[in-house]
Image: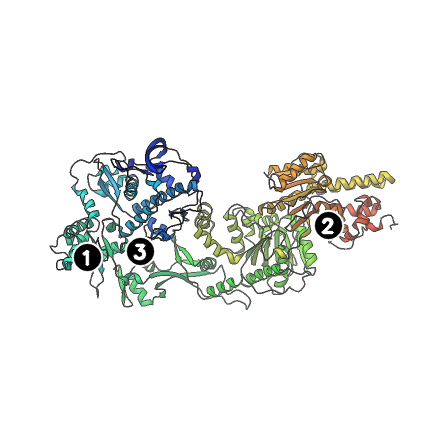
Amino acid sequence: MFLPADPPRAGRLALYGDLTAAGLTLPAGVDEKVELVLPRGDQVRRVAVPARLLGMEQALEFLTQADPSGWAGDSADGRTWVEGDSAGRQASANGDSAGRQASANGDSARQPASVQSGAAARPASVQSGAAARPASAHGGSRSWGVWRAAAWAGVGLIARGRVVPDVSPAGYGAWRVAPLDTADRGWLKNLVAAMPAQSYAVPLEGSRPLRLVDPEQLVRAFWDALADTLVRTRAASFAVRAGAELFGEVEPRELTGSTEWLSETALAEEAGARLVLRIEPPEDEDEFRAVLQLRSGADPSLLVDVADMWSAPAAVLAALGERAETDLLLALRRGARVWPPLSAALRDAAPAEVVVGDEALDELAGDGTALEGAGIEVLWPAELFAGELAVRSSVQATPTPGAVTGPDFRLSELLAFRWRPTLDGSELTEEEVAALAEAKRPMIRMRGRWVRIDQDLVRKLRRGGTRKLTGAEALGAALTGTIDVDGELVPFDPGGPLQTLLHRLRSAEEPAPLAEPVGLRATLRDYQRRGVAWMAHLADLGLGGCLADDMGLGKTIQVIALHLHLSGRGRGPTIVVCPSTLLGTWERELARFAPDVAVRRYHGVGRTLSDLAADEVVLTTYGVVRQDHRILSEVSWGLAVADEAQHAKNPLSRTARSLRTLPAATRLALTGTPVENRLSELWSILDWSAPGLLGTLDRFRHDVAVPVERYHDEEATARLARVTRPFLLRRRKSDPGIAPELPQKSEHDVVVPLTVEQATLYQAVTRESLAKIEAAEGIARRGLVLSLLTQLKQVCNHPAHFLHEPGPLHRRSGKLAALDELLDVILAEGESVLIFSQYVEMCRLIESHLAARQVRTLFLHGGIGVRKREQLVEQFQSGQAQVFLLSLKAGGVGLTLTKATHVVHYDRWWNPAVEDQATDRAYRIGQDRPVQVHRLVTENTLEDRIATVIEAKRNLADAVVGSGEAWLSELSDADLAELVELSTTPAKSGAASAYNPSAVGKASS
């Protein structure tokens, strides 16, 4: 509750009782005992209770903080009102002039529902009876809510200029909130009606029997204390009058000298009649007039012209009060101080009206708060505000004729910006625009009525539309419906080709089903067909986009299908830019699903683009693009694809800049994580795929990134969504339209290249071991073969694994780089993963590497006891870590790890049954989500060839390959050499192989 004081700013807010029960945290303050009137049995008594006392600044901060209990409603901008009221909150706190005018006219419809008369209009928690809250906290939460509402209302009144200087009972110069209009008083009465007794349990001094202070007067005293605290600045003293410096000082000082000038404020509060100015427009080009009227305080519906007051009936004069003439004179004196034209009425013996010049009219129409603060109401003719004179914007372009299926609007072309003034939504004629631009008055006669002119609008028309826009900027404006002009958001109307493009672009959100293209050796799922149709629609419009499907939804096959769909149109070849770890995967997926497509790997020594076919697919890496961007920019690509586009998420990086040099009719970015940390990453991806759409990076940061990331601006978020929606297709595995189509378990090989160091070690080990094997026989030979296989697998894993080194680990292994790529996406999607290796040493190296990346891991191996093993499983299942490293033998059986939706086999066991058992730690009963299995295979190595054998003979795995690697020791020297050599010819998945395990033990040629 509030404890008043003199001067008002010395008042304090008293917090007592159990605040924690109401969900509040006790702020810092002074602890004292205060005397309150509280129930004791069936009586009330004066009781001294301990309380925390807050000064006015502390109290304001406490009452306007975010509500922890959920009792009072918070708006997006932090303003608060009694629960259930949003419209009233805005009208009372933001000083909305339209709302003020309506309130001053007694328009009850403008009052918030929660403060209108009647219990039904108040929130349930304010009404009598039980509330949806614990009984112990009920009174406390209600008291908190009403004082919180009172604080915000007081701040709103102060913001509206409803403050006046006054003298306190003790003689101090003080500020107080006044005057209150009819709507303000009505709101105050309803707030008081909602106050529980605990919120004003201050005893009235000297009362017998014991009585409480008037809650309405207590709220008024609280508002005065807020005004006396907030208004005291150096400028406040100059706003009062010369010699009134003490009204800007913080320390209390007694007023000296005459204070008669302050009595006018009190008289205005007690006035029986209020001055009203009714603005009358002229019939022709004459000046406007302000007719003086008086409104009865006893009957606000009674409004009398001052000119008729002298001859009005006695009943009317009685309703205006005995002091009506004095009230009029004092109101004119107060008004003349803030609006000089009223000085003419003071000089008139029988004032009836004043002439309003253009400058005075403009001032009055722009901001009437000063007159309102003086207790004077302004009534405007309805016609002046019935029509809305506004300005919209558009562009003019000369369309470039394109092919029947090609674009007729290009993002790179320049367009002329122009203004489109409108009246009530109807565009003005050229003659009306000219008259508007030449207007000298704040009002203009147009279409048979007076219309108020916005001077900003006139300045825009006079300046004209000299700005040029790119097609991308115009498209962004068309999508949001607004355009930023000198820091102001102006409505934007697309037209001509831009309107056509906008219509076609929005239809792409639900494109027509696309038949599977000729040459595709696969059956697309329904959501994949929709994805291909969406990309094809953008390509037909000459635009690009970002396919942001979750990992495992088949982005690669959708792009392959798109390439086949666009083939034969003379668009040019396709280039796919991806991490080096995915080159092999792309090459094999193209060979598997589109074997008739010519594919070229532009990577490594001797790379060339000579004799490039029209519909050929070129595979390259981000590193090569950085090095050869000039060569690659000489080709007119029909389709450019950036896979794992987050590699270019830093817009200032050399990779991102080089990628932008690739000329392409259509650019597509593929990523499962379009935004990982900052919105600038999304800008970088979309600025490549749809150049210019989001503007410059600096403008994007200023207008979008900062408001959204720092201030959670809902309007900026909505604008960004409207712009990006047609160009960003984001789908998750959990989406209702996708989840039923996914297989419960999907497996694929991630084919990765060896690093230079790995390739050198691989060749050295092969050369040395094969020489020894050729000279050995029997068991010794078998041992050497198995040793060779183990060493080569270690080399393929990581050079540090083969050399038994603790590090360094970074950039030495293709597999480790591929694992990083996988984990970046998996962890960004919030999913969990199991990583299997048959080597404990390799698991330790991975654990060390991930720790350096600050990725928390769990590690299970054969040396861990049963109890610790159970703890690790429980920690993983409860989500304490997203990555679980397991040695294949220790973790391959007997565990339930259904938290994982991904399984990575870092190295191959070459026994499908063992690998399947390990995979089944995640894919088992209790798993309610699809599981993806990723097998890391080094390209053109022993791993690659044996993986082909296992895939081809998987149905014979138990009978033939079940013995693991033993069958490999029986190969002839020639077959073994061919098996382990490092070749440049990729093995094709599922193709026939010379390494036939069913032939083990038979004669070989």
The image position of residue 404, as x and y in percent, is 55, 69
Mark 2, secondary structure of its residue: loop
Residue 941: in sight, yes or no?
Answer: no
Q: Quadrant of the N terminus?
A: top left
- In this rendering, the label closer to the viewer, 2 or 3: 3
Circle 1 packing at 10 Å, graded few (<14), some (14-19), many (20+), is many
Circle 3 packing at 10 Å, graded few (<14), some (14-19), many (20+), is some
Q: In this view, does 425 lie to the left or right of 567?
A: left
Mark 1, secondary structure of its residue: strand
Q: Which of 728 and 345 is in front in this view?
A: 345
Residue 377 higher or lower than 823, as above or below: below
Disc 3 marks which residue?
108
Q: Closer to the N terminus: mark 2 or mark 3? A: 3
Disc 1 marks which residue?
293
Residue 389 higher or lower than 223, as above or below: below
The image position of residue 27, as x and y in percent, is 40, 35
Disc 3 from disc 1: Cα separation: 22 Å
Disc 2 marks which residue?
984
| Callout count | 3
Determine contact: label 1, label 2, CB under 8 Å: no
Q: Which residue lies furthest to the front in this view?
A: 42
Q: Which amino acid does label 2 sit on?
A: Thr
